[in-house]
Amino acid sequence: MLDCKEAYELICKAIDRKVKINELESIFGQNNTDIKNDNEKTKRVRQKDNYIDIKRFAANFYKAPIVNYKGYVNGSKNLYSEIIAKTLVSEDLVKEWDKLKPVRPNHFDTDHTPTQNELSITNRKEEILAKLLFYQGEVKDLGYIFDYQTPLKKARSDSYGKIDLLGYNTDDKYYSVIELKYRPSGSDETLLRCVLEAYTYYKLLDLDQIVSTDSHEGISVLRNLKGYKHTKNVELVVLFDEKACTKNDGGYKTNLMLRLNPKDIANAVYPSKTVESQQHKECQELLTTDKRDSLRILCETILKQEPHLKQIRFVVLRADTDSKSSYPTNIKGWSRKLDRLYRAETLLTIPSKG
């Protein structure tokens, strides 16, 4: 049985890259608090060989720099991300994700009361966009968004992140674990990272807590949606911008965010050049070429080993300048000039065959 170090070295070898000094510790850590029940033999192996629990590989691998490598391995015709995806499947490493279990007793104990001031708490544009989608609620062709920045960690020392958005697919009747990728200058993260991050978060989410939560505003509205019923079925959604446009390229109508203060319209910020997001580029390759076949096989393998995971959707988010829907009325200080509504377009769905 491989440990975390051996699994990571196996993938690095596949892409002809050496493990850098201190990389294992910085990515995966060596916290022993989750191994108290190991037998003495395993403890001795860990102490002797600097063993890192294999669960830490599954929980943290999406953060590894190699997962975000673009281009080809040493001038070959093999894409870094494709070789990594292929190795995860061929070496049965993707099965290690099954060892991940939810640890947080209450995912929904954070205060997400919608106010305009909430938008200014952070400078992270991706988080602000997540809040805007949560405030909108129903997003055409995406579903109803009932939570954002959903915490997964139990203790401060846990390495787990937060789910960008939780939604309910009103058409298919699935919960949606949504990985949002957005930067005003164009996001450069690979689809491989997006899929692995979304899958990791899915494994760390306790869906039954939705039933037991009483005071969360988004969940209260969710329960009143027509046709809603609690389910174990889930989809993974990678949600991304198509491109960040200059003003002359139509950025005013298409860019997802321009400003947060209605008075700042004259100071709206545009990129210096129009940039297509990495996710949109790779999704087009998934659709029209065989360059991303290993990523597709990885997605199918994930779906095959998860009976309640029904599909993986790749979705582009767009500004909905033509919508007739009213803007949120439950947000104090919200202005119709603040920003736009949003809609989505599913570019590709990989369904479960089970």
Image (cartoon, helix red, strand yellow):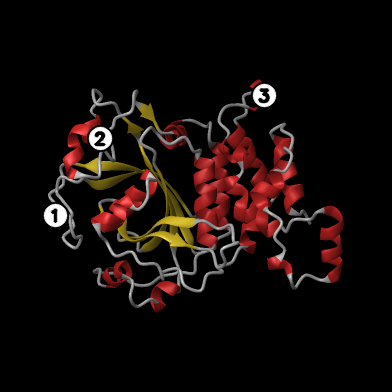
For marks 3 and 1, give the CA distance: 53 Å
| Residue drawn where x is 49% and y is 55% of the image | 352
Q: Is mark 1 on a helix, strand or loop?
A: loop
- Please tell me whether mark 3 or mark 2 is closer to you in this view: 2
| SS under mark 3 | helix
- Up/down of 354 relative to 87, above or below: below
Checking the image for residue 137, the label placed there is none
Q: Which x, y percent locates residue 162?
A: 47, 57
Residue 254: mark? 2
Check if mark 1's residue and mark 2's residue have beta carbons within 8 Å.
Answer: no
**Image spot of residue 239 (x, y percent):** 39, 46
Amino acid on which the number 2 mark rests in the picture: Thr
**Badge 1: residue crowd in 10 Å (few <14, some 14–19, many ≥20):** few
- Residue located 24% across and 69% down the image: 226
Residue located 49% across and 60% down the image: 309
Res. 169 image quadrant: bottom left
The residue drawn where x is 38% and y is 76% is 213
In this rendered view, identify the residue nearer to me: 55 or 272. 272
User: Badge 1 is on which residue?
Assistant: 326
Q: How crowded is mark 3: few (under 14 residues within 10 Å), some or many (20 or more)?
A: few
Q: Return the residue nearer the eye: 75 or 48.
A: 48
Helix, strand or loop for disc 2: helix
Q: Residues within 10 Å of mark 2 (few under 14, many from 20)?
A: many
In the rendered structure, the answer to whether residue 278 lies left or right of residue 347 reads right
Task: Give how far across and how far down residue 107 sits, in percent.
Answer: 45, 68
Specify whether 290 is left or right of 225. Answer: right
**Which badge, 3 or 2, comes first in the chain's sequence?**
3
Q: Earlier in the sequence, mark 1 or mark 2?
A: 2
Please tell me in which quadrant of the rendered image residue 35 appears. bottom right
